[in-house]
Amino acid sequence: MYPDPLLVAGALVVDDDGRIFFQRRSPQRKLFPNSWDIVGGHLEPGETVDDALRREVLEETGWRVSAVLALVGDYAYTGDDGRDRHETDFLVRVDGDLARPRLEEGKHTEFRWLGPDDLAVLDETRAVDDGMIRRIAEDGFAVLHTLGM
């Protein structure tokens, strides 16, 4: 049984150029179809936020979390499935080929590395996510800036 609200862990994966990784959800997804997203997902029963963060990064990209750099923020929202969610997002570094993520088949269709001046692309899906991913991205870059990156 999952808690209410659902607990979600999110990873803003950072590269050496200070860009953040985003992937597009497939059009078949029930929640936020065809929208840009960060890596992440809900906690399985008995799982910690850190465990879920590491599992989701591996499942969705094939990369392994090498370092959790900082907390980005906590976000509460109701999905278009009617479920309330509490999401905790972190800036992370990963090990693996950053040019070739292994996107989870059927769940994601493309990816992009965005810098702070590239975020307008996230507005493409504002109608689906009410601008939430753009806000999370802006928060992520603000935290990156405080870390001197």
Image: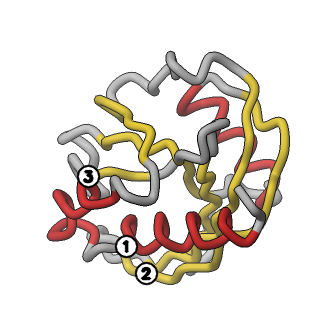
Residue 112 point in image, percent of width and height: 38, 36
The image quarter in which residue 7 lies:
bottom right
Q: Nearer the viewer, residue 35 or 115?
A: 115
Q: Residue at x 81, y 48 (%)?
A: 51
Q: Residue at x 77, y 60 (%)?
A: 49
- Residue count near mark 2 (Cα–Cα under 10 Å), binned few <14, some 14–19, many ≥20: some
Kind of residue at disc 1? Met
User: Mark 1 touching mark 2, by CB under 8 A?
Assistant: yes
At mark 1, the secondary structure is: helix
First along the sequence among labels 3 and 1: 3
The quadrant of the rendering that contains the C terminus is bottom right
> Is residue 17 placed above or below 71 in the rendered structure?
above
Q: From mark 1 to mark 2, how far is it between C-alphas?
A: 9 Å
User: Mark 3 touching mark 1, by CB under 8 A?
Assistant: no
- Residue count near mark 1 (Cα–Cα under 10 Å), binned few <14, some 14–19, many ≥20: some
User: Mark 2 touching mark 3, by CB under 8 A?
Assistant: no
Kind of residue at disc 2? Tyr
Residue 142 point in image, percent of width and height: 59, 72
Q: Nearer the viewer, residue 26 or 6?
A: 26
At mark 2, the secondary structure is: strand
Residue 48 point in image, percent of width and height: 82, 59
Q: How many marks?
A: 3
Q: Identify the residue under disc 1.
A: 132
Q: Identify the residue under disc 2.
A: 77
Q: Identify the residue under disc 3.
A: 35
First along the sequence among labels 2 and 3: 3
Q: Residue at x 66, y 30 (%)?
A: 58
Depth-wise, is mark 2 or mark 3 nearer the camera?
A: 3
First along the sequence among labels 1 and 2: 2
> Is residue 112 placed above or below 31 in the rendered structure?
above
Q: From mark 3 to mark 1, how far is it between C-alphas?
A: 11 Å
